[in-house]
Structures are given as structure tokens and as C-alpha cells.
Amino acid sequence: MTKVVFFLFIIFIAAVGYLLTLNNDNVTLKLSQEFSFEIHKIALILLSSALGAISILALFFVRDARRYIESWQSHRQQKKKLRVQELYSKGLDAFFACRYEEASELFNRILEDDPINLNVLLRSGDIAFNSGDFIKTKDFYAKAKDIRPQSVEALFSLERVFEAEQKWPEALRYLDNILEIDEENPKALYRKREIYEINKNWETLLDVQYKILKSNIPEKEKQEEHKNLFGYKYELGRHYLEKGELDKAKKILRAIIKLDKDFVAAYLALAETYISEGDVEEAEGILIKGYEAASDLLVFLVRLEDFFITIGEPGRIIDLYQKAIQKNPKDHALQFFLAKLYYRLEMIDYAFETIMGIDTTAVDYPDLHILLGDIHDRHTQYDKAAEEYRKALKAERPFLVPFCCAHCSYTSKDWVGRCTECKQWNTMALDLSGTCKI
């Protein structure tokens, strides 16, 4: 490179010398209207070249200086970034290990140098939330939202705080902000539905449920949400029933039955609606229809048992039990409940005869021994009664709770349309075989 420059310099000197032999006269150089002077042509060429060279050198100097400054600043920023990243990584480790004081101290050190660090503000808000300091929590989350107003995480975080405080309008407002950014956000829709459910706002909840079904969720999840749709419609029907808006209740419950003939809870609620109106005949028709269409016979038979005894026609429920047993002669549960019905009606001999027809080697219900013990007690056969009670006490399970959730095995003395444990509808059934967990 040096040789090339030297060679070019020699050529330049030679060219100047050649021009000098051809141009010996002077020229007038004007610097302004008043100031001018004589200068040799070759001197002018050399002066112009020198000024050009100086200008180029100055440009190179400025460029190199700027590059140096930028490099220095970049190195400094990189060093700062690595320090922040190291502190943030240590803070996260402490946070996930639930060492909140240590994490908070590390995050505060970051915020001293970088007060608009979004992730650090969010994690600091999480620490304050876990500590129960909602004022400080909202301060951190609000700062994060100010830095990035479209941050879905910041909006969800703020919604979570107001939900914890049970300030439902504020929580819903932030969920609506998220849905303005992403109208099919499943998490936001689920959160809205949960809030409406807590407040029993079933009408608005159904609107959200339809949006969930239209959102981009997995097909398996969508099938579950279709089932939930019937459940929420049932809750709306129950809501109208409790408010005395019976026509609305009947309309919704009938629609459920039409689409799902096995929805036991809808049949029972619809029958309850007609009973509230005093239309016993229509209520009976609904219960019979449900009994004939649904797969869970026992639940309907037990409900029909109460219904027919209430209206003074126990013979009709006995007839239904007997017909069911004729179709399923090996169904010990049907025979057991018929025996319980006879006992309830003070038909002790019929109860004894029915219960003795059950093969106790195949089934061992605690209730069966208790019922048989009560029958022996009524016949003053106290030794036999005591023996049956002992068998009931020796059973592997404690006294059977009549209704059990087929989904989560939650047990309840009373039938309910929706399991209070897993929140599933239409899952409560009578379980005499002991398959439910106690």
C-alpha cells in the first residue's frame, strides 16, 4: 500500500513539474470584491490539492472519531445490558424459589439504572401481589402499562389485582382492553365468563360463551365448551325459575331437552317449573318423558317417588319400579330401591320379600343391611336386626352417601344439577356399587 502511495506521489510531482514548464505566468486570485492577489498557477494547483487533502483527512478523522465514540457507547451499553441480564436472571431464580425479599432487592437495583424495564416492573408487581400489597402491586403494573399500553401481560396483571379485590367492573374493563387488542383471546374470555358466573350474570355469560365457541380453541376443548353451553343455559333457566319468570324458564329448559335428551337436570327443573304453576299433570309428563329418554333411571325413579307420594299416588311409582325390574331382573339397585320404597310406605312384608330376593353374595351395600336390620327390628327380631347392623358397620365403606358425581367422585346427600366440586352438570348419580371415592 505504501509503495503504491509513493508511486502515485512521484507521478503527481512529475505532473506538477511538467505543468510548471508550460505555465510560468501568474493568475489573480480574488477572495472578495476588495481583496485579491497574484499567485503562480502551479502554486494555486498545489494549494488546492493541499486544501482538498486536508478536507479529506478531516472527514476521515470525524468518521473515525464517531466510530470510536459509537463503539465505546455500544461497549458500555452492552456491558450494562449484561449486568442487567445477570441481575434479572438472579432475581428470577430467587422469585421462583419464593425468596421474594432477595428478588425484590435485585429488581430494585435494576430499576435504579433502568426505571422503564418492562419485565422487571411486572415481576416486581408479582412479588407485591404475592405479598398482599395491592397498592404497590397496582403501581408497578400501571407503570408497565404506561411503558407499553398494548402489553397483554400488563393488562392481565392489572385485571388479576382487581379480581382479587373483587372489584368486578375494573377487572372487566381490563379484560375488554385485552379483547380490543385480540378479540378471540381465550384466556380473557374465560376470565370474563368466570366473573359473570361468580356474579350469577347468566344472560351476559351466555354471550361470552358463544364467543368462546367461535374463538380459535382446540377441537377437543370446543366439544367441552358445547357441553358447558347447555350447562349455562340450564343455570339461566334456574335463574328465571327462582325469579318467578316461569315462561322464560320453560322456554330455555325445553330447548335444552330438545338438544340433549339425556340432560337430567333440565327435565327436573322443567318439572319444578310446572309444579310452581300448579300444573301437576304437565310436571308428571315431563318426569315420565325424562325417565323414558334418559340413561340414568335411578335418579328419575327417586324423584318420581317423591312426586307420586306427594300427590298421593304411590301405586304408580311402584308400578314403574316393577316394570323396570322386569326389564332388568338382575339389577340389584332397582330391587333395593323398591324395597326402600315399600319400607317407606310401611309395606314391611313386601319390603322384606323384595330385599330377600337380592343376592347378597353378589352385592354388599351398607344400606341394604341397614334396611334389612330395620325390617327385622319392626318384626321384633332383634338378634337378626343387630346382626345386619353389624354387617353394615363392617362394610368396607362408611354409610353410603346417596348421590355421587361421576366426574370427580364428589358425594352429596342431596341431588344437585351441578356438582359443587368440579362444576360439571348432569353428573350426579346414585352409586350403590361403591365406585365413588369417599
Image (cartoon, rainbow, N blue to C red):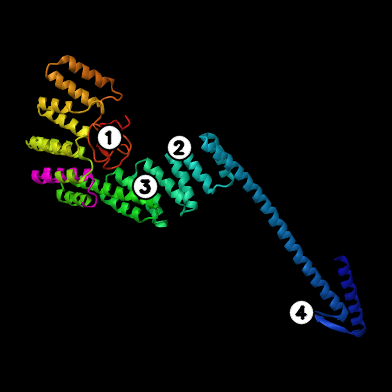
Q: Which residues are magenta?
A: 258-287
Quadrant location, the N terminus: bottom right
Vertical side of 247 occupied by 376: above or below: above
Q: CA distance from mark 2 to mark 3?
A: 20 Å
* Left or right: residue 174 compared with residue 235: right
Q: Are marks 1 and 4 in contact (CB under 8 Å)?
A: no
Q: Badge 3: few (under 14), some or many (20 or more) residues near its Cα, within 10 Å?
A: some
Quadrant location, the C terminus: top left
Q: Residue furthest top?
A: 383
Q: Which residue is mark 3?
A: 191
Q: Residue furthest left?
A: 312
Query: Where in the figure is residue 267, as x and y percent of width and height?
Result: 19, 45
Q: Please, what secondary structure does the residue beneath circle 1 have?
A: strand
Q: Amino acid at mark 3?
A: Arg
Asked if the stretch drawn in magenta spans residue 394, the answer is no
Q: Earlier in the sequence, mark 2 or mark 4?
A: 4
Query: Where in the figure is residue 332, as x and y percent of width and height?
Result: 21, 32
Q: Which residue is mark 2?
A: 130
Q: Residue at x 87, y 72 (%)?
A: 8
Evaluate whether residue 380 shows in this view. Answer: yes
Front position among marks 1 and 4: 1
Q: Which residue is mark 4?
A: 32
Q: Earlier in the sequence, mark 3 or mark 1?
A: 3
Q: Residue at x 57, y 43 (%)?
A: 88
Query: Where in the figure is residue 24, as x and y percent of width and height?
Result: 91, 84
Q: Earlier in the sequence, mark 2 or mark 1?
A: 2
Q: Which residue is mark 1?
A: 404
* Left or right: residue 309 compared with residue 138: left
